[in-house]
Each structure stands twice: as C-alpha cells, then as structure tokens.
Image: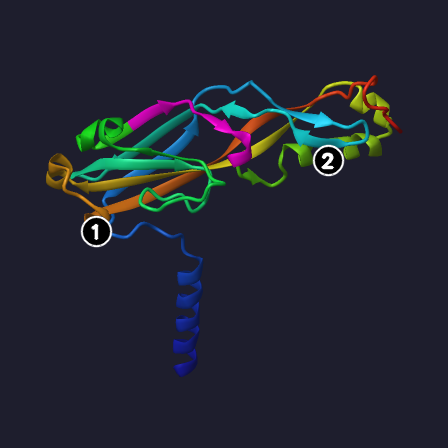
Amino acid sequence: MKHSIKKLAAFGLIAALSAPTYANAADWIESVSIQKNGIDIIPIEVRSNGTQYTSIKTNSHRFIFKLRARAKSGKRIVGAALGTLAATDYFEAQGNSAWIKRFKGRDVANGTLRTWQLGYEPNIPVSKLNWVGKDPVAQCNALLANKRQQGSSRFSILNTAQMTTANAYFKLDAVAARTRKAKNHSWNINSSTQQAASMNYQVQVTCLPSSTAANKISN
C-alpha cells in the first residue's frame, strides 16, 4: 500500500512538473498577442570585406506589428509596452542598449477599452535589436560556408548579392486594471496585473556583394 502511495505521489509530482503553466486566477487579462501585420520585404543589408561578411550596413528597420490585448470582464487595458528584451516590463526601466515603446493615455483610449488593438510600424535602430539564434552577419557567413561546402567559389558567392533571413525578438507586456480605477486614472502597479506575449520576427537579409575594385576577393 505504501509502495502504491509513493508511486502515485511520484506520478503526481511528474505531472505537476510537466503541466503547462497558466495565468493565475487573479489575473485580469484574458489574452495578449503580437504578430507581424503584413509582409515585410525590406531587407537588412550586410557588408563584406572580400573574404567574409563583416557588419550590418542598415542603420534602422521599419517593423510592422499587430498588437492586441483583451481584459477580462470588469477590467480594462490601461497600458502596454513593446520592447526588444525578454525583460520588457511596462513599469520597469530598460537599459540604453534596449528599445522600448510604452503605450499609455490616448494610446490605449485612456483605459476605456476591454479589447485594445493597434497596428504599429516603428523604425528601430538595428543596434538595439536582439537576435534569436544567429544575427544577420552570422547568417550571411553561415550561408557563405554552406555554399563553399557545396563547391561554390568564394569569388562567385561574394561577387553577387545573397539572400537569407534572421529573427529579431519582441515582447509585448500589457497592463489591466479594474474599470473604475481605469476610468479615474487611479491605478498603479499595486492595483493592476500584467500579462505578456512574445514573437520571433523574421526579417529578410541581403548579404551585399563585395566591390572587386575596393576589396580583393580571395578563394
């Protein structure tokens, strides 16, 4: 009997550890989502020095987002923050290396909406992006290495534009408060709840050809 109880207890522990994580019952947000709002065809450009790919030429990139948050009954969306860090938080300050945009006041209809959604197209400095996996330069060099292994010469690869992709990380953090506090603008971090969603935003990458006049390409 004791053996059976131990087995059941162990099974319960395993089930608890492997179960999906859900929002707390006290959470006032029903859902949060962040998506690409259309087709982003403008590439980020990467330079070559004639031997390999070295740096990103593009200074900033225009991203196209569809942002959405829905509060539970009796609650309203009062704020949101979109950022390039996993630590993106509406109430927390971010470092200089990060990009963040906070939506408040008129951005969220002054807290009158249960469902808030917005098409948003910011131009973000490439230096403030965080890449999931390889960054654009590493992606271009991986493409170069792969083509070299397939028998292509370095000259033939670096003498023409090459195309690949890279993934930038984004997180949307939404804030909800009770309808009365939202209406009176009397909510704060202690009288609100937060929920977040994230995405890997795929961008096109152009590995630029080297100038044979300026850079001698070696095989």
Relative to 57, is 162 on the left or the right?
right
Mark number, residue 142: 2
Q: Which residues are magenta?
A: 117-128
Query: If the image is split into quadrants, where does the C terminus sit?
Result: top right
For label 2, count other residues whose C-alpha is less than 10 Å away and answer few (under 14), some (14-19) or many (20+): some
Q: Say which label, 2 or 1, has the lower sequence index.
A: 2
Q: Is residue 53 visible?
A: yes
Q: Where is residue 207 drawn, in percent x and y? A: 70, 24
Relative to 117, is 205 on the left or the right?
right
Residue at the image position 55 percent from the left and 30 percent from the top: 126
Mark number, residue 211: none
The secondary structure type at the circle numbered 1 is helix
Q: Is residue 126 magenta?
A: yes
Color theme of the render? rainbow
Residue at the image position 28 percent from the left and 52 percent from the top: 24
Q: Which residue is mark 1?
A: 190
Q: Is residue 152 visible?
A: no
